[in-house]
C-alpha cells in the first residue's frame, strides 16, 4: 500500500467472494471437468485462488490479450499475445477475468472461443465496471461491481505496478 492507493475491497472480502464464486461453479458443474481459461496477466491471482477453492477436477489454460499497453484507457483494438494450448471442442469452459470495463476485450474473446465449439462457455469475473461498458457482456459469475475509478491490486496493475497488493485499491 502507498499514498497513491486507497483500499476499496479488503483481502478478506476478496477471499469471501472467491469462496462464494467457487461454490456457485461447483454446484453448476458437479460431475463435470471444466476448463478454466485465465486471461493474463490480471486474472492470475484470482484464478489461482478460485481454482484451489473449486472442489472439482478442473483443468487450466491461459490466454494473453492486449488492448491497454501502458495506458489507463483501452485502445479499442484487441490482439492475442499468447494463445491457448487446449482444444475447446465439446468442453465446458469458464473464462476467468479480473475486470470487465468497456467490454471490448472480453466480448472479442468470448466470440473467439465460441467459434471453437465448446459444450458450454461461461464468464467468471472478479470486478465489473458497468458504467464504462461500450459492448454488452453477459457475466455468469460476478464478485463485485465497482465504480468508474482506476483499480489496482490483487493482480490488477498500472504499468506493471501495484499488481501484488493483497487488497483491491483505487489509484489516485
Image (tube, rainbow, N blue to C red):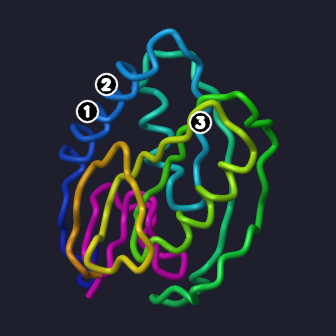
Q: Is residue 157 above or below residue 166?
A: below
Q: Give the crowd class for mark 3: few <14, some 14-19, many >=20 residues within 10 Å.
A: many
Residue 97 locus on image (x, y percent): 48, 54
Residue at point 30%, 48% (across, down): 142
Q: Give the crowd class for mark 2: few <14, some 14-19, many >=20 residues within 10 Å.
A: some
Q: Give the crowd class for mark 1: few <14, some 14-19, many >=20 residues within 10 Å.
A: some
Q: Quadrant of the N terminus?
A: bottom left
Quadrant of the image occupied by residue 153: bottom left
Residue at point 72%, 40% (across, down): 117
What separation in Å lies between label 1 and label 2 (alpha carbons)? Answer: 5 Å
Quadrant of the image occupied by residue 172: bottom left
Q: Earlier in the sequence, mark 3 or mark 2?
A: 2
State the residue position of label 1: 20
Secondary structure of residue under mark 1: helix
Answer whether labels 1 and 2 touch (C-beta < 8 Å).
yes
What separation in Å lies between label 1 and label 3 (alpha carbons)? Answer: 19 Å
Secondary structure of residue under mark 2: helix
Residue 77 locus on image (x, y percent): 64, 84
- Most foreground residue, 31 or 48: 31
Q: Is residue 136 above or below residue 141?
A: below
Residue at point 43%, 60% (across, down): 164
How many numbered badges does the structure rendering display? 3
Residue 47 locus on image (x, y percent): 49, 43
Residue 115 locus on image (x, y percent): 73, 50
Q: Earlier in the sequence, mark 1 or mark 3?
A: 1
Task: Report the disc number at residue 93.
Answer: 3
Q: Is residue 8 left or right of residue 28?
A: left
State the residue position of label 2: 23
Q: Nearer the viewer, mark 3 or mark 2?
A: 3
Residues shaded magenta: 150-172
Residue at point 46%, 27% (across, down): 52
Amino acid at each position: 500500500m502507498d499514498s497513491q492507493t486507497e483500499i476499496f475491497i479488503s483481502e478478506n472480502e476478496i477471499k469471501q467472494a472467491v469462496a462464494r464464486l467457487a461454490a456457485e461453479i461447483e454446484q453448476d458443474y458437479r460431475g463435470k471437468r471444466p476448463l478454466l481459461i485465465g486471461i493474463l496477466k490480471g486474472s492470475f491471482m484470482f484464478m489461482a485462488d478460485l481454482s484451489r477453492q473449486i472442489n472439482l477436477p478442473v483443468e487450466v489454460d491461459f490466454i494473453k490479450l492486449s488492448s491497454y499497453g501502458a495506458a489507463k484507457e483501452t485502445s479499442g483494438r484487441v490482439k492475442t499475445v499468447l494463445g491457448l494450448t487446449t482444444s475447446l471442442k465439446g468442453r465446458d469452459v469458464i473464462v476467468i477475468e479480473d475486470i470487465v470495463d468497456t467490454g471490448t476485450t472480453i466480448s472479442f474473446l468470448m466470440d473467439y472461443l465460441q467459434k471453437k465449439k465448446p459444450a458450454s462457455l461461461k464468464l467468471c469475473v472478479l470486478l465489473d465496471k458497468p458504467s464504462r461498458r461500450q459492448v454488452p457482456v453477459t457475466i455468469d459469475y460476478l464478485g463485485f461491481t465497482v465504480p468508474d475509478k482506476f483499480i489496482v491490486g490483487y493482480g490488477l496493475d498500472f504499468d506493471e505496478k501495484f499488481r501484488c497488493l493483497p487488497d483491491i485499491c483505487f489509484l489516485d
